Amino acid sequence: MLNLSGKVALVTGASRGIGAAIARTLAAQGATIVAAARGSNAEASVADIVLAGGKAEAASLDVTDQAAVEAIVSGTLAKHGRIDILVNNAGIARDQLMMRMKRADWDAVIATNLTAAFSCTQAVLRPMIKQRRGRIITISSVVGQMGNAGQVNYAASKAGLIGMSKALAREVASRGVTVNVVAPGLIDTDMTRALASSTSETWALQIPLGRLGTPEDVANTVCFLASEEAAYITGQVIAVNGGMYT
């Protein structure tokens, strides 16, 4: 059994889907969760955690607002005295063929998926280095590894997260901070449920395990990487894709 008792985890994009599952799973192992999302969207996730006996609080955060990111980190440190785990999960998609893609849609995806992860990571680095312990886990995507037509902005952002994390892992390893990436494949979330059933069935045929992943499949991997059991793992990309891409 993994034990995260006494650890404080900041999870972005924690309102639903993969982010909510990550928050619940970390809390179930004893971590105190700061569940960040736009507006009051994380409150339902927090209520679920508290109902199950866990510790969590909601934080209203637009991850593209660097000042807001720094304020959340400062507030968490003031209240809890530490941040042990950062999960960069917040992300958006603005799909379109490249020939038709608007610059605004490119900029929005890069700002939310990549630049915001940079801001969140930079904000927690100093306290993690000071305490000589930290876990930074970033959610990329199989699309960042294999590409996908109509998603050049999304693929670029998710591939960028991989490069950023591998470089940072080398910078901070000697300080007791590990940096890893989880790259989910096709996961059963609101986004995939919105697809036409024929489309999702076609995609499922590409998965050797024969099913879509669940948010919990991703969350369990994140929880392991956040634990002491993963202390010797850094700079890695862990694929959670059912064999869709190897």
Image (cartoon, rainbow, N blue to C red):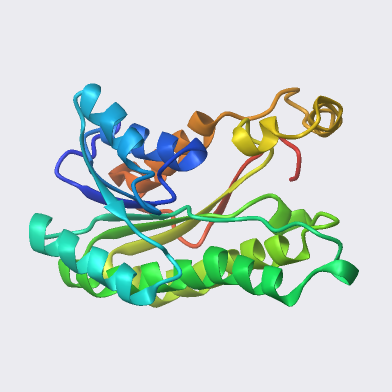
Establish if 34 lies above or below 210: below
Residue at x 47%, y 69% (from the top left corner): 116
Residue at x 29%, y 45% (from the top left corner): 228
Picture coordinates of residue 97 (x, y %)? 86, 62
Q: Quadrant of the N terminus?
A: top left
Left or right of residue 41, residue 100 in this image: right
Residue at x 44%, y 50% (from the top left corner): 13
Name the residue furthest front.
39
Res. 190 in view = yes
Frontmost residue, 24 versus 38: 38
Picture coordinates of residue 95 (x, y %)? 76, 57
Picture coordinates of residue 208 (x, y %)? 78, 28
Frontmost residue, 92 versus 81: 92
Left or right of residue 32, residue 39 in this image: right
Residue at x 62%, y 65% (from the top left corner): 109
Q: Quadrant of the C terminus?
A: top right
Frontmost residue, 209 versus 66: 66
Establish if 61 lies above or below 169: above
Picture coordinates of residue 76 (x, y %)? 18, 59
Res. 1 in view = no
Establish if 15 lies above or below 233: above
Total marks in image: 0
Establish if 176 lies above or below 13: below
